[in-house]
Image: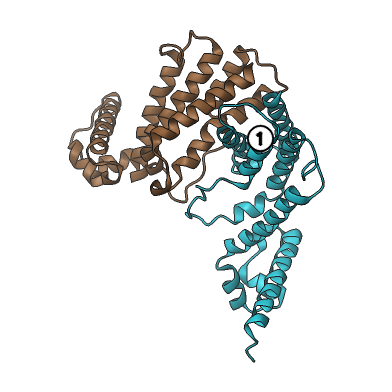
Chain colours: A cyan, B brown
Amino acid sequence: MPFGKPRGERADAVRNRERLLGAAREMIAEHGVEKVTMDGLAERAGLGKGTVFRRFGTRAGIFRALLDADERHFQERVLSGPPPLGPGADPVERLVAYGRARIAFLLDHHAIARASIERGGPVAAGEPSVSQLHIRMLLGRAQVRMPSLNGLSIQLTAALEGPLLLYLSTPEADAPPAQEVGGFLGDSWQALIERIVR
Amino acid sequence: MPFGKPRGERADAVRNRERLLGAAREMIAEHGVEKVTMDGLAERAGLGKGTVFRRFGTRAGIFRALLDADERHFQERVLSGPPPLGPGADPVERLVAYGRARIAFLLDHHAIARASIERGGPVAAGEPSVSQLHIRMLLGRAQVRMPSLNGLSIQLTAALEGPLLLYLSTPEADAPPAQEVGGFLGDSWQALIERIVR
């Protein structure tokens, strides 16, 4: 096998990555997250097992890569998509839209998010999340008067994402349907925002 | 060794448990959480290793038992201690006091709480937490008008405990001092409650 130029190798790597992520999405859509394995993914994408291991490291790494790609897409919709999620709407409307969109995103991705966690791995923490920074920005634009908008944005991020994480960690048999939960949490989020900004 | 009557055996078990928890508290106060081992605890309490294993199962089990005992004590202060944490004060004052006391409790117990988690163990979820039930009760008494006080109590519990869990999962070297964080989160909690009930 001839060695390409570095530039060519990088383009190859990008192509392989896209091909693997595409194959993983197909496998998830057809058979669910549980059925995705490193071997099955290599076969489906028509690539060597070594390529899959180099690219993702572990099975959880596949789901982390999928989640990263979708998270980037979500952030693009927030930063430059149509209002009210994207720029151009009133900041309070955007706060409400952000919460509803975020809840839907997390519910849609719960199987992938769960599969992306390495057992016994470290908890990601420390940096303010993208949600928190976005909520902080919109609270400032909405001219909400509070002693600390940083404090409020931390609390609101927890109020938005915490109940969802709790729901997603509940065994499926005991949990109400996702659609019901999404509607309830979306309405509660809107009520909370409207109460705080009034 | 003679077999005592069931009643006598149970009183023994309670005594041993108290003795072990007392010894564990002393060891933590003197040398910190890291130095508590099953063997060290048995020696300190003057009991057999078998008793310690039967009582707690694992090292993490020691810290869970300590946390349970302190959590019960905290709940007693809430249910029947002096106001404003206990009954007798205005519900809004009690909401503020509850948040501040809960923050202090979680900060005080963070080393024990961390040590009580079994690596790779299940995440406790599903049942509404005691915080959530208490906040729900006080919101009702404060006659807060919102579409769903259940939704609001879930959000407020997450807003109260989420930022703390995030802080406590940050590596110590990167984290601001607990006292500073406690003050900031307590003030933010009070501002949030006052905003919501006004």
In front here: A44 or B108?
B108
Q: Position of residue B28 (x, y in %)?
A: 27, 38
Q: Position of residue A82 (x, y in %)?
A: 82, 47
Residue density around tag 1, few if under 14, some if 14–19, many if 20 or more, within 10 Å: some
Vertical side of A123 occupied by A1: above or below: below
Q: Secondary structure at mark 1?
A: helix
In front here: A92 or A45?
A92
Residue extending farthest to the right is A82
Vertical side of A69 occupied by A103: above or below: above
Q: Chain of mark 1?
A: A
Residue extending farthest to the bottom is A2
In front here: B163 or A184?
B163
Kindly indicate the quadrant of the structure image that contains residue A196: top right
Give the labeled residue for mark 1: A140
Kindly indicate the quadrant of the structure image that contains residue A176: top right
Kind of residue at badge 1: Gly
In the image, what residue occupies the spot 32% across and 38% down? B55
In the image, what residue occupies the spot 41% across and 18% down? B77
**Is residue A74 in sight in this rendering?**
yes
Query: Could you tell me which quadrant the C terminus of chain B lies in?
Result: top right
- Left or right, A82 with reference to B175: right
Q: Position of residue B48 (x, y in %)?
A: 21, 41
In front here: B102 or B40?
B102
In the image, what residue occupies the spot 48% across and 36% down? B164
In the image, what residue occupies the spot 63% across and 52% down? A113
- Left or right, B145 with reference to A56: right
